[in-house]
Image: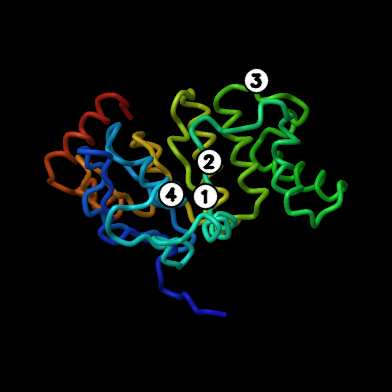
Amino acid sequence: MIDHTGQPYIEFNDVSKSFGSNCVLDHVNFYVMPAETLCILGRSGVGKSVSLHTIMGFLKPDSGRVKVAYEDITDYSEHEMERIRKKVTMVFQNGALFDSLTVGENVAFPLREQRDLDEKQIYQVVDGLLDMVGVKAMRELLPSDLSTGMKRSVAIARALSAQPEAILYDEPTTMVDPLMANLLGDLIQKLKHQLKLTSIVVTHDMRFAQKLADRVVFLHEGKAIFFGTMAEMEKSDHPILREFLELDALVLPA
């Protein structure tokens, strides 16, 4: 057993990624320690989601190195990434649920893929997960019957059924009302503390980040212009950060 004490669970080391002439990530550095939550902040189109897709191996960096689950995955094949994706899973913005399956069947899907539980055990695990995320009463409904926020909760339950070590969340509060955003934040916090999950949350919602983040990376024009704690960010005199913080305070009064 390799001792990973003191090592980041996920790390970007000088990572760059361009699409044609558009440089989306420009020598970006950040890391996430085990059981910590990193929030990736910034306006639309600054590479937040590209960062998540790079961690999952859906995209490869043009240069730099990416470590996930303590392994350098930069040159991994799709077959090697399948093993990593058993440890690190992603909750997509749209939930990516199977429309033809009920809520319960969606959550059971990864359990059935593993093939090491009988139906009674699967039923118990599914019920426990749906209860944990607050949607147990919706077990027999189809995704089309759910609100956006409820779909996100079900997607989180399905991600958890694979028993991952880390979850990546892509804009979990987009298109949900403030009450549901608050509940999703509480849920992500609960999973971190109860299951010791490592988390990365892409968001533009400052209040959400303040609630969740152990550390923050702020992306602007492809560069990570800040990496540190929320308290350090709030004290920063960087003009871009100040503008972002002050605009947020105007839009979302305390």
Alpha-carbon neighbours of circle 1 within 10 Å: few (<14), some, or many (≥20)? Answer: many
Placement of 214 over or under 188, stated as above or below = below
Callout 3, which amino acid? Ser
* Residue that badge 1 annotates: 167
Q: Is residue 145 left or right of residue 70?
A: right
Q: Earlier in the sequence, mark 1 or mark 3?
A: 3
Q: In percent of the image, x 55 and y 54: which residue is there? A: 85
Say which amino acid is labelled 4: Ile
Mark linked to residue 91: 2
Residue contact at pointers 2 and 1, CB within 8 angstroms:
yes
Q: Are marks 1 and 4 in contact (CB under 8 Å)?
A: no
Mark 1–mark 3 Cα distance, whole angstroms, equals 24 Å
Q: Secondary structure at mark 4?
A: strand
Helix, strand or loop for disc 1: strand
User: Residue 25's mark?
Assistant: none
Q: Nearer the viewer, mark 4 or mark 3?
A: 3
Quadrant of the image containing the C terminus: top left
* The label number, if any, that marks residue 200 in the structure image: 4
**Residue marked by disc 3:** 144
Q: Of callouts 1 and 4, which one flags the residue occurring earlier in the amino acid sequence?
A: 1
Indicate left or right for 93 with 205 as reference: right
| Alpha carbons under labels 2 and 1: distance apart | 7 Å
Q: Of the residues shown, which amino acid type is indicated by label 1?
A: Ile
Disc 2 crowd rating (10 Å Cα; few below 14, some 14-19, many 20+) is many
Tag 3 or tag 4, which sits nearer the N-term? 3
In the rendering, at what x and y percent does residue 16 appear?
A: 26, 52
Point out the tag, 2 or 3, that comes first from the N-terminus: 2
Q: What residue lies at 75% left-to-right and 35% top-to-bottom? A: 104
The disc labelled 2 sits on which kind of residue? Answer: Val
